[in-house]
Structure formats: structure tokens, C-alpha cells
Amino acid sequence: MPKEIFGPDYAFLPKSKVLSNLEILRIAQSFCELGVEKIRLTGGEPLLRSDLVELVSSLKKETSIRDLSLTTNASLLPRYASKLKEAGLDRINISLDSLKDDTLEKMSGRKTKATTVLKGIDSALSVGLKTKVNMVVKKGVNDSEIISMATEMRQRAITLRFIEYMDVGNTNQWKLDEVVSVDSILNKLSEHFSFESLKPTYKGEVASRFKYKDINSEFGIINSVTKPFCSNCNRARLSADGKLFTCLFASKGTDIRSVVRKEISSKELTELLYSIWNKRDDRYSELRSNSSNELNSEPRVEMSYIGG
Ligand SMILES: C[S@@+](CC[C@H](N)C(=O)[O-])C[C@H]1O[C@@H](n2cnc3c(N)ncnc32)[C@H](O)[C@@H]1O
């Protein structure tokens, strides 16, 4: 959690309010009935969940999910990488915004060292997990590291994904002029590397992908601020306490926890999820790009709660 939220007085949710693995599994099975094929476990920090490996294992064994991935800050990854791989995890995304410890602290609000994250990356690679690295780019903070990060990840043949800094939540005091646009990221990269753009592999792919011409490796850019992709967005998000959100920038979610804790059949649960999804009309990022639009003025959920 960012330092603005997490402090000595922070009240953690009691365990009874957090979805159990069985409840998550049931909700995942209903989503699969509706055609969902991908699940990403994120957070907060998913590796802090003590029964995460069991969750991965049951999602792989007891649902038809074909792509199960995890987004993590990698601090605990050396301990869990091989267990996660054995449990069936397909892919992992690791957040690393800087190779400099003080900048990393500014970006993440935590005192993690870059070498700790790099060790986590190497532990994922050593057990054969498909690995990508995410770098949120913020003007004047870490944009001077676009080339050094690209170079570091090229050496490991890892896909690096540059993410435009977004106004998720309320605590990051986001300003549009802190966003480094996709075009300026590409300009910087083109001064050092030769690359070509790749076609999306599926509808709704969030990253624009590029292949380096000299090596068999690629990078991506997630340009949700300067080129929003709301109309292609196909992500539903479920919080740890069981709220279902149909947009990353929403203020409210629908309580699914209380529903799964009642005597509800799987068919009824599936119908409920279908009706929530079918009614959605969120397109916050598209509205934000046109300043004449009225944006939702209610506080938005935080990134550490909804998971990115
Ligand atoms: C919120 S984190 C949660 C998972 C895990 N704790 C981690 O650090 O990767 C998920 C992703 O959101 C990204 N992220 C966080 N704040 C962001 C922002 N303001 N704009 C864009 N991406 C952001 C992070 O870099 C990370 O890749």
C-alpha cells in the first residue's frame, strides 16, 4: 500500500471480511461459465496472502481458466516462485519502476531495493515462469530511466511494459503534466533501439506491442491516458472483500461476498454476474481525455484496493 494509506494506525480487515479461497473459486467458476478465460491475481500484494499457492492450484485444477497470472512487487518471490510454478501459475508480471533505490521508493512508497526486485525477477525466470516487468513512467521522477530499464530487460530477454501514469484513486495527487505519453516514450526508445510495432494478438489487449529488430524480444506500452481503450476493455475486477467493479476508476462496486455467503445456486450467481456486466457503461478514461466532460466527482477506489 502507498504510504498515504498505510501507517501505524491502519486497520486491517478482519479475516471474516476477506473472501476465502473457496469463495473466490466459486466466483471464478461462474465467470468461466460466462466465457472468461483469464484471471490475474493482484493487489495490494498478493504474495502476502498465506494461502495464495493453494488458490493458484485450485483455480488451475477446478476451473477452465487457461491463463492464470500474478502481478507482484516480487519481494517475496524467491520464496514462492517454484511453488507457484508447480501449482500451475502461467505467467507473472513484476513491478519495477526504477533501478535506483531512492526513485523506487518515491514511486512505490516503500523501501524496497531494486536488487531485491531483480532477485525476484531472476527467481521467476529460473523456475521457467513467463515473466514481464511493469514500469509506471512519471515525468521528472523516473522518465530518465526509460533506456536503462529497457537495456536491463533486454539483457534478460524479458518484455518490459511502460505504463502511462494514471489517476487511479485519490491519494496519488495525479496531474496530467506528470504523464509521459506513449509518443514520447517511443521517441526516446527510437534514439537507442530499432523496433517495429506488432499487431494485437487479441481484441482488448491492453499493451501496444513492439519487437526489437536486433534481438528476439519485445516491449509494450500501456497508454490508457493518452490513447484510452475503454471501448475494448473487458476486465472485471473483484476486490479482496468481494466487491465487483466494472471499471478501474469506479467509486462503487457490487457486493458479491454477501451473495456467495447466502444459499445461492451457481446458476443464480452466474446470472447475477452476467447482469452486472451487461449493464456496465463505464468509460472513465475516454471521458477524462475530453476536458469538457463531467467526471465522476465521488472518491474513486484506490489502486492498492482494486489492483490495477
Ligand atoms: C497496484 S499494483 C498491485 C500488485 C503488486 N503489489 C505490485 O506492486 O505489482 C498493480 C500494478 O499497478 C501499477 N500502478 C500502480 N499505480 C499506478 C498508476 N498510478 N498508474 C499506472 N499504473 C499504476 C503498478 O506498477 C503495478 O504494475
Image (cartoon, rainbow, N blue to C red):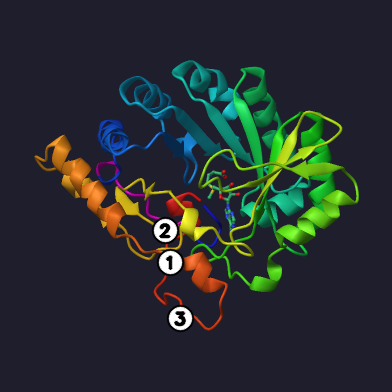
Disc 3: which residue: 294
Q: Is residue 21 above or below residue 297?
A: above
Which residue type carries mark 3?
A: Glu
Residues rendered magenta in the picture: 6-16
Mark toward the start of the polypeptide (2 vs 1): 2
* Separation (CA) of disc 3 from disc 1: 15 Å
Say the numbered circle drawn on residue 300: 1
> Is 57 displayed left or right of 19 in the figure?
right
At 32% from the left edge and 26% from the top edge, which residue is drawn?
63
Q: Residues within 10 Å of mark 2 (few under 14, many from 20)?
A: many
Quadrant of residue 212 within the rendered picture: top right
Question: Label 1's element?
Answer: loop
Mark toward the start of the polypeptide (3 vs 1): 3
Magenta highlight on residue 124: no
Which residue type carries mark 1?
A: Arg
Disc 2: which residue: 247
* Of the pair 285 and 245, the residue shown nearer to us: 285
- Main secondary structure of the magenta stretch: loop
